[in-house]
Image (cartoon, rainbow, N blue to C red):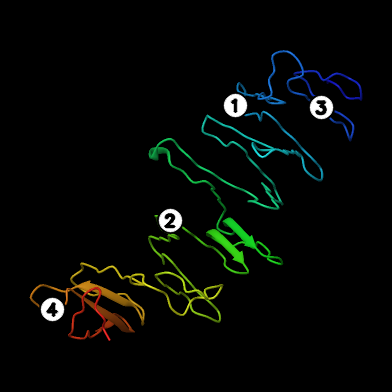
Amino acid sequence: MGADDTGEDIEIGVYNSAPTGTVLSFQVGSGGNASSTDPTLLVDSTLFFQNPAFLAQAASGSAVLAFNNSFVGAAVSGNNSGGGGGVSGNCDNGLGVLGTSKTKFGVSGISSPSTNLHASAGVLGTSNESGTGVSGVSGPGFVPLPFPGFGVGGFGSQGGVRGVSLHGVGVAGGSDNFIGVYGTSQYNRGGVFYSGTKPENFGTEVPNTTHDGIAQVRLVPSSAQTLPKKANIGDLFVMYSPKNQLPNAPVNLFLCVKNMSAAQWQQVQLAPKIYKGGDTPF
């Protein structure tokens, strides 16, 4: 047993306790060879692989509270060069990690590996099938309820989830056995696609027209020789046309009109005139 009362020295290697309100004060650079870049407190457990370097417990409130009034660095910084986690948060009934900010991000995750071979995600969220891996909430009154089985869930007054990219895909969805991207709305359209520049009156609503741009939607043609046997009414299917067979269009579009024991398709007839890019069709 080490120190257990006010005024006693801390003993290294044994358990020390202190009454409520005890404050430990460390001043870096006050003596010896310490510099302003050295940590104020350094706790190392390199030799003890299963033990935490620093353990804080609190019955209520924050177990660890850190302040940083400068524009650089972080109030709490964690580094792990052995493949584990830099900072780990765990909680049985509350939040494992809580981040708040008045002017910037509450939580920011950055991954910057030196090579593409070690590329990873800036933020990783995992949950069992009854919860959500990552939950995002925007706007007052929103409660971060889980989406069962979803990797990412978003709640917002203007939008649930938004993805923006300058040179890549804004939002990517993929699935081996189910729908890659699924959009629903109770009182509006399930999905809207547009390409081009936004009109001057563009706001929170979807614009009625755009300027320039390219095709709004693309259906990648299939090279299959037969139509799908499984389909639902309203499905669209584009396939390459066999050579030397009418119609002479390189691809043809089909619409599923019945889905009984086997799907039934009808071909969408195309106008005979062919237009080139830059032509005025009307």
In this image, 61 relative to 102: left or right? right
Between discs 4 and 2, the one toward the N terminus: 2
In this image, 219 relative to 175: left or right? left
Q: Is residue 130 above or below residue 98?
A: below
Front of the two marks 2 and 1: 2
The crowd level at tag 4 (other Cα within 10 Å; few <14, some 14-19, many 20+) is few
| Residue 141 image position (x, y, % from top left) | 71, 67
The crowd level at tag 1 (other Cα within 10 Å; few <14, some 14-19, many 20+) is few
The crowd level at tag 2 (other Cα within 10 Å; few <14, some 14-19, many 20+) is few
Q: Secondary structure at mark 4?
A: loop
Residue placed most toward the observer, 2 or 253: 253
Q: Quadrant of the C terminus?
A: bottom left
Label 4, on which residue? 248
| Residue 29 image position (x, y, % from top left) | 73, 20
Q: Residue at x 87, y 29 (%)?
A: 18
Q: Secondary structure at mark 2?
A: loop
Residue 32 sits in which quadrant? top right
Q: CA gap, disc 3 to disc 2?
A: 47 Å
Between discs 1 and 3, the one toward the N terminus: 3
Label 3, on which residue? 25
Q: Amino acid at mark 4?
A: Asn
